[in-house]
Amino acid sequence: MSFPTLSAALDSLLALTSPAVIQRGEDYFRGGCVRALGHTPGGRFMAIVSASADSTYRVFVETRDGGNSETWDSVADFGCNCPYDAEPVCKHLVAVFRDIQAGEAVDVGEDLEGELWDWLAQGRESAERKVQLERSLRSGDIALLRACTPLATRSNVHRFYAAMETLRGPEVLQLRRELNRQVYAVSP
Ligand SMILES: [Zn+2]
């Protein structure tokens, strides 16, 4: 079944995704790495993405209004349990987005609802926060970057530093110290 408004919402998320990740995700999609893509009647999608026996990950996409909303906000949350967190969308999510857009998701009824929530419980973080972080990193705006400090991790902090590269002033030094303290537990 196809979901035109949800497809547009997924494209909005892909617009915030780096070309290299999109390329690899589309290779996974075309290579048939997306297995067991299903959705509940309420619009919660889940899938297994497996490129090899030792790389199998679980992906979910949760919609609002069963995917009928007119804006990108029809995606309430999304996630993957792989370790990649340098940007909101990983290659596994790209592959699943493409599979959803291709109309491959089947209605699995409410039976898998419990299983889905077990997945969601792992490192759940709202889509709004992930997207806010990505927009802030791209903005080069010191106030926006500071607001996202709590989301900095060892694997994404290099992107904060890159975003601050052309910025100057005392608040830039201050933010640098805050990031160091938080990510590496370094005293100022
Ligand atoms: Zn992933």
Image (cartoon, rainbow, N blue to C red):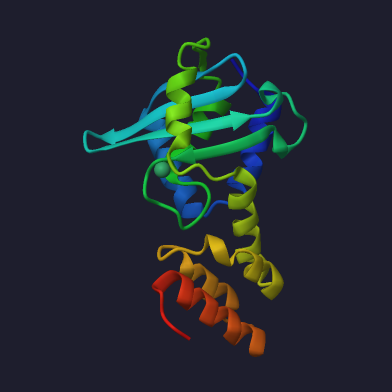
Residue 124 x, y percent position in the rendering: 50, 42
Residue 70 x, y percent position in the rendering: 78, 31
Residue 33 x, y percent position in the rendering: 35, 31
Q: Going 65% across and 63% down the picture, which residue do you hit? A: 136
Extreme residue in the right direction:
70
Q: How many marks?
A: 0
Extreme residue in the left direction:
53
Query: Residue 44's quadrant in the figure?
Result: top right
State whether residue 37 appears in this view: no
Q: Going 64% across and 31% down the picture, which residue do you hit? A: 7
Q: Going 39% across and 41% down the picture, which residue do you hit? A: 81
Q: Is residue 60 above or below residue 15?
A: above
140 to the left or right of 118: right
State whether residue 46 appears in this view: yes
Q: Is residue 139 above or below residue 26?
A: below
Q: Is residue 29 above or below residue 171?
A: above
Q: Going 44% across and 40% down the picture, which residue do you hit? A: 80
Residue 45 x, y percent position in the rendering: 53, 25
Q: Quick one: quadrant of the N terminus?
A: top right
Q: Which image quarter has ligand 1? A: top left
In this rendered view, identify the residue nearer to me: 14 or 57: 57
In this rendered view, identify the residue nearer to me: 92 or 81: 81
